[in-house]
Amino acid sequence: MDDAYSTQLTAGETVETSGLEQLNALKEGDAFLVADGWGDMKGGADGLFTDDTRYLSRFVMTAGLARPSKLSSGVSQDNVFFSCHTTNRPLPPMGGRSAPAGVLHLERRRFLWRNRMFERVQMVNHGVEDILLPLAFDFGADFADIFQVRGTPRPKRGTLHAPTTDGRRAQFRYTGLDDVERRSCLAFSEPPARLTGQRAEFMFSLPKGKSVDLYIECGLDACEPPDADRWRLNAIQARLAMRAKRRRGATVRGPRSPRFNDWLDQSRADMALLTTDLPTGPYPYAGTPWFSTPFGRDGLISAWQMLWLDPSLAKGVLTYLAARQATETSRFQDSQPGKIMHETRGGEMSALHEVPFGLYYGGVDTTCLFVALAGAYARRTGDLDLIRTLWPNLIAAAGWMRDYGDSNGDGLIDYQRGADTGLSNQGWKDSEDSIFDSEGRFPKGPVALLEVQGYAFAAWKALADLGERLHDGRAPEWRMRAEQVRALVEDLFWMEDQGFYAVALDGDGRQCGAIASNAGHLLFTGLPSPERARLVTRRLLGAEFRTGWGIRTLELGQPRFNPMSYHNGSVWPHDTAMAAAGMAAYGERDAVAEILAEIYAAAAHFHLRLPELFCGFPRVAGEPPIAYPVACLPQAWAAGSVFLMLQAALGLSIDAWTGTIDLTDPVLPTGLQTLKIQGLRVGDASVDIDIQHVDGRAVAVPKRKQGRLAIRTLR
């Protein structure tokens, strides 16, 4: 994802000054809500968004003309509810008396369901006298496009109509330059004493020892009157829907270690939160707040991380992306026939082509990952029916790799943006300064990234394997292409004097010799020779890469190294996880288990929710990892990292064609004596597996096996 949109909110207001790191996010379907610790939205980075439009931009509560004193706030572990507990400051005199501070308990409790915000404000009087409470809400709806919120200037926008009020409701309307009329409505269960288009004022009588509830709803249509029954019914539905998403696939549990299991639970809950059930199946949106939409690369990698536990994500991602495969060439969209999308958006600016992201294809790796994941999914599930359905899309993707992805005919996949509005770098490190040579100079295009060649290698291999099963006569050609890619990478990217691979080749075929974590992704694909894989592993595990909290994206001492940067020295959990999985594929187990323990230690300092990235400073005893201030939180491939690293440490692979589950030299992280995998399904068979330390070694013990399935521990 492009960090050009991660540093700016609106003109003149930076994320840092608005305190983005303190914001709380809820998501349900295509709607998400961002608010501060009090539950307030103030028109900065926050608000209620649907389809990349902000339908509620301001919503601030005051009690007695002041913001109440916060006691605690946060999002529930299942990610359904936000709650904030506050108490009153001294209230102004009412009838000759003024209530002292700290006698009222005010709880704001909120959730999203069906593109709608539901909120309950519960007021409890713990004082010794009856109290009159002035409660007010300032509100507004600016209908800003998400790119406008993120800082993209707009010289002109549509017509924002004056709000209208009706007893307990305020209604908002905006006519966009795309001639679409967007509406939203804010409604209260009690009629305010005074209601305007920007403010609702109440006066509640609170008898001592009693409580009073106010219900509030905000949606895209004319609001039904909120009440306790609507709140309760919709809250139950929201919680049940989230529970169903969390229970998809197999589960994995540690020993009676609440913290480790809480990390697993939080990671699974975050993946469920970000997953939207689309007509094509479940799709993990990339992250909140800025990337709550389908991204190609993020969805593919997140689904791959979860594949061994829950293949339904991969099926949903593959099906969705196949339906949006490019069929024509567009420089503005960076598309060519057969290419898989990078990002899709639904707002006004995208519809008007003010930004190219309505349906944008500027990711050089997504097409290769699409084919490679299809092969991994088929091996994991044996689902040839889906592969037959997707076969025309897979063949079209192969055509893009052959005809368009290799723009200069040198056998390597490369990129160069088609228009200045597109992304200048189109791999996963897509910030403008993330790809450079050993002197820190930016390469001329077209650029061939190291890890993308690994994805292409995996894609050609996957296509050959699937082609053989479908009796496609082109399978030998595809296998030959995989080996040609392998030979080219080993010949052109390897730097003998460094014992490492160059991060890229520039348009003249010269090595960009920066030492970067991209080589870990190459290990993940299985391309390097065993000897070179050992050298790369040794360097990735060295102190220049390894922080004690994970692996840096760039080696210490390289040009442009900055541990506080987006891509040039920070730690991305998914990047570390892919490197760990790559090392494990070449037999490294102990270090992988150690890295998993390090990432767990980092997660513990982030309230067990791994952010998109954090700073790459070395670990210091007694001190936490240093947060990156504008990281997405939660983020899908950060949440999925723990499951990929667990699979890597266990050496676990599943082959549905043969009905086998192999655990090769399994290792458990330090301090973890047992691990339970429950409900692991392979075709029509299922099994529970207990993994435990016996005589210093991890041993897998099958439990409750049903159907024909072989579980093997290999040494």
Image: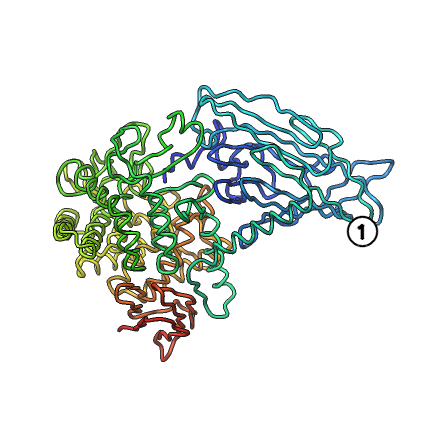
Indicate the position of residue 706 as horizontal and vertical percent values: 38, 71
Query: Along the line of sight, which residue is nearer the eye, 181 or 571?
Result: 181
Whole-percent x, y for residue 528 in the image:
19, 56
Q: Position of residue 667 (x, y in %)?
A: 34, 69
Residue displayed at 40% across by 62% down: 597
Q: Is residue 637 left or right of residue 407?
A: right
Give the quarter of the image for residue 97: top right
Give the quadrant of the C terminus: bottom left
Lateral position of residue 350 relative to residue 172, left or right: left
Q: Is residue 496 visible?
A: no
Q: Is 224 placed left or right of 649 in the picture?
A: right
Q: Is residue 235 above or below residue 669?
A: above
Position of 566 relative to 521 (above/below): above
Q: Amino acid at mark 1?
A: Gly
- Residue wearing tag 1: 209
Figure check: 671 above or below 198: below
Q: Nearer the viewer, residue 469 or 417?
A: 469
